[in-house]
Image (tube, coloured by chain):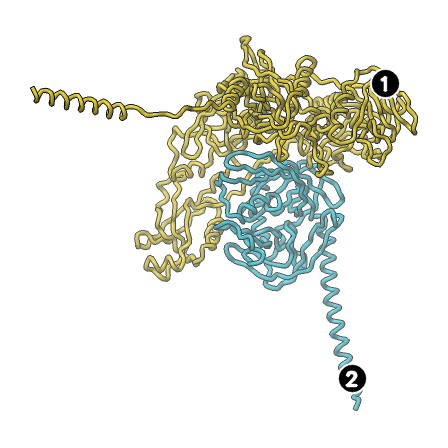
Chain colours: A cyan, B yellow
Amino acid sequence: MFNLKKSIFLLALLFSLFLSSKNHADDISSAGTALKTKFESCVVTVNLVIKQKITVQGREMNKNETKSEVSGTVIDPSGLLVVSLTSTDPASLINKLQGRQSNDNQFKYENEITDIKIKLGDGQEIAGKIALRDEDLDLAFIQPIEKSVSFSYVDIKQSIQPQLLDQCFSLTRLGKIGNWNVAVIPDRIEAIIEKPRMVYLSNSNRLGSPIFSVDGKFIGLIVLRALQSETQSNPLMWLTGDIGFMPVIIPASDISETAKQVLEKKEEK
Amino acid sequence: MKNYKKFYRNFFFITFLTLIISSCAGKRIHPPILKDSLTESIDKAIARVKPALIRIRVVSTEYFDGREIRQESSGSGVIIRKDGYAVTNHHVAGKAIRIICTLSNKEEIEAKLIGTDPLTDIAVIKLDNDGNKNFPIAEFGDPSSIKVGDYVLAMGSPLALSQSVTLGIISNTEMVMPQLFWPFNKFTLDGEDIGTIIRWIGHDAAIYGGNSGGPLVNLKGEIIGINEIGLGLSGAIPGNIAKESAENLITKGAVERSWIGLEIQPLLKSSLIKKGVLVSGVIKGSPAEKAGFKAGDTILEIAGKEITITNTEELPLLNQLVVKLPLNEKSEFLILRDGEKKILTLETIRRENFQPQVFEFKEWGMTACNISLLMAKELKRKSEDGVLIKNIRPGGPCGEAKPSIRSKDIITAVGDKPVKNIDDLSKITQDIIKEQTKPVPILVSFERGENQYITVVNVGIKELDDPGLEAKKAWLPINFQVVTKDIAKAIGIEKLSGVRITQVYTYNSPEKLNLKRGDIITAVDGQPIKIDQPEDIETFRALIRQYKIGSKIKLTILSDKEQKEIEVELPASPKSEREMKKYRDENFNLIARDITFFDQMEKDGESVPSEEKGVIITSVEPGGWAALGHLAVDDMLISVNNKAVSNIDILEKTMKEIAEQKSKYVVLQILRGIHHHFIELEPDWEKK
């Protein structure tokens, strides 16, 4: 027999579940929108011209130049921004994966940056230069050469250490194909790796993109962690899973510590 | 008496026998030897030509990615005049900026380019002749006398070896590019289709890379061709064409030819016309168009000479006739059109090379050239005005402009100034960059196809100053390995965990670091090091880097099976290669840097003895003087012209002195691995 009370109760339960999930979705949407509004101008595109040099047994081959577009995060009102070092120096990743030592003179593959342009959200382009490299943390700090422009920046002192499965967002500056818009990607902290140093793992993999907590605190930056291979690279590594690199999130505190070396030098001047 | 007779009889018999035996043992009997007339002819031919053979080493320029690139290559040549004129191929020496010739007696002599003709792929060089030297020469023979089956010698320097000879026979006297390879059946050099006026002498004497420019010689020791290509069969430019081009290049600096603008092909099989040659096309604005030629006409006579062309092998001969028509003069053509004969009078014009010289414009980040008449026709342009972009540097001013300027665009104006040619663009560029310290934005007009565009280019060179600083981190001056479970078990301490020291660096104050190879670090500041996989090596490094520079840490170590605690102060990590002071020498196109701490450590695990100090070469640009001398990246440069160079400042000072003095020879002493070498450079200070 049809039970009216039970039916009403079930309907009410279903409706409340629906409402709560909608609310949750609204929460994520609001948080993401707020982050985008606050931080999108801090995420910039960096256009690089990279010269590739190959040396075989001491003999230098003719160099090639290529253009590259990477994502960067401004961390200081002076315009100092940070990118993943690998994105500016792909040769270092290839050498690591192929087990090539830095003193290998049989075959050397090196990169040199010949031009840097910082492209702001409004389309303005400003010339830049490399201020500091940190190979250990996979960070490169870029300074604008022109001082006349004011920059929006992420205050890396307002940072947070996330817990496992905490919700987070990454902001990514899409390239030419996305008309350089900013994408807001909801995510979670999927792992906290403590060795050899503290890094976090999420699904986001666009190097140089900042990661924020739901309430807008800076968690860190997406960089590439790569292991120096002991042997020649495994050509089947994509099938066997023997991949020696992985995008990870470097904590804000580590970025801040290294950035001091640039900012303190600036103050001395 | 009887005994004496017997004695003498025996004596003479034994003596006779001895003589017979000794005469047989002392002599060999030879059959008669027949003379090999072919071998003798070959020897004579080689003896006649070999002294005149030269191995040619060339530094030439190519244009790629908006830059002028230098390249080294090698080919062959043959001296044809006693004062030092020699013939080779255009593709060997036509773009040479430096030529070094090695004679058959191993003497090295510099040479200069006199002239070059891409259409016949012939170039002429002249060996430097200070003291009116008489060089040995080879002479051209009469190629009309050659026939299939004749023996020939291909002489030259294949693979940059010293003068070499291969033997073959003439396989084909009318070799053209095979139709089978269409559309790849053209041999093009700098826009010129060589096969339009050349029918190669095909032969089967082996030729290899480096043989180009060397002579094909008959058994009389005469040049009958200049080796050029390999298509399975080897191909030589006929000697008469090579000789004619060479003589023009020597006397006039160029080969003058006529151009009429007609496109011709063999008579069609379906045609009822059995004599003449078919006009397939007439180029707009050409002398042929002005004379009234039309596609479909049949040419019966040119300047009174009857013509019949029924196959592709005959076309080059007709083209040779056409290019030799009197220049800037009228010639009569008897044609057949719609069944009627007509005479058309045509005035020839000068045929320029298709591809003018290319120039690099560093301030624009591109390479460009003028537009030749033939190029303008191909581009369907009425005018030759403008500058054609050959290629651009991706990150250079042209590449970065919005919209960017691309390869094959034609710059027609800069600002309000028209650009008709390279000279115009050069002058305008000098005006723009004069006294400017940074790039100048300039409005540029250019054509792309049928469209006219404008853009803004930031003209000027801007060097990016990469300070190359690395983040300073705390460093423990040791190298180490992880103590794995297997290693722990093997050394008898199963639960041992930590890192084993493999190397101790004597850095700054060696006596303060009370560690040695073999010690095992088990804890840092009381915290045990819990690692047992080789990959964990980064964990220990990262642990140390997290300390501040100058921190004092306590290491718990196992040394000679005895546990100790040692205090260590952590210095800053030594400077990396990137951070070392550098010097760039523009004359020799090399870059060097000061030695790092680790460079010295690499040598033998200890500090390098003082006499081994030097600077490290980090870049040797291809085609530069240092590259020609085979200076290599990672060489340690110890001295220059006997002056020790222990650091970059001394190197810079020494190189500036050498440049001021314009030293004829520059001797570098280098250390490569464990081997010392002297490298002798001979810069030409007039050419960089």
Label 1, on which residue? B332
Q: Is residue B250 left or right of residue B582?
A: right
The residue located at (49%, 28%) in the rendering is B648
Q: Is residue B15 left or right of residue A1?
A: left
Query: Where's the C terminus of chain A, which quadrant?
Result: top right
Q: Which of the chains bears the disc numbered 2? A: A
Near-viewer residue (B606 or B273): B273
What number is the disc on residue A7? 2
All told, the count of numbered labels is: 2
Q: Residue furthest toward the top?
A: B132
Residue A260: % across, % down: 57, 44
- Where A159 falls versus B583 (above or below)? below
Residue B532: % across, % down: 43, 58
Measure the alpha-carbon separation of dots 1 and 2. Answer: 108 Å
Near-viewer residue (A220 or B460): B460
- On the same chain: label 1 and label 2? no
- As shown in the figure, which amino acid type bears the numbered disc 2? Ser
Location of residue B509 by image quarter: top left
- Where B567 falls versus B306 (above or below)? below
- As shown in the figure, which amino acid type bears the numbered disc 1? Glu
Residue B61 visible in image: no
Task: Identify the secondary structure beneath mark 2.
Answer: helix
Residue B520: % across, % down: 37, 53
Near-viewer residue (A144 or B51): B51
Query: Where's the N terminus of chain A, which quadrant?
Result: bottom right
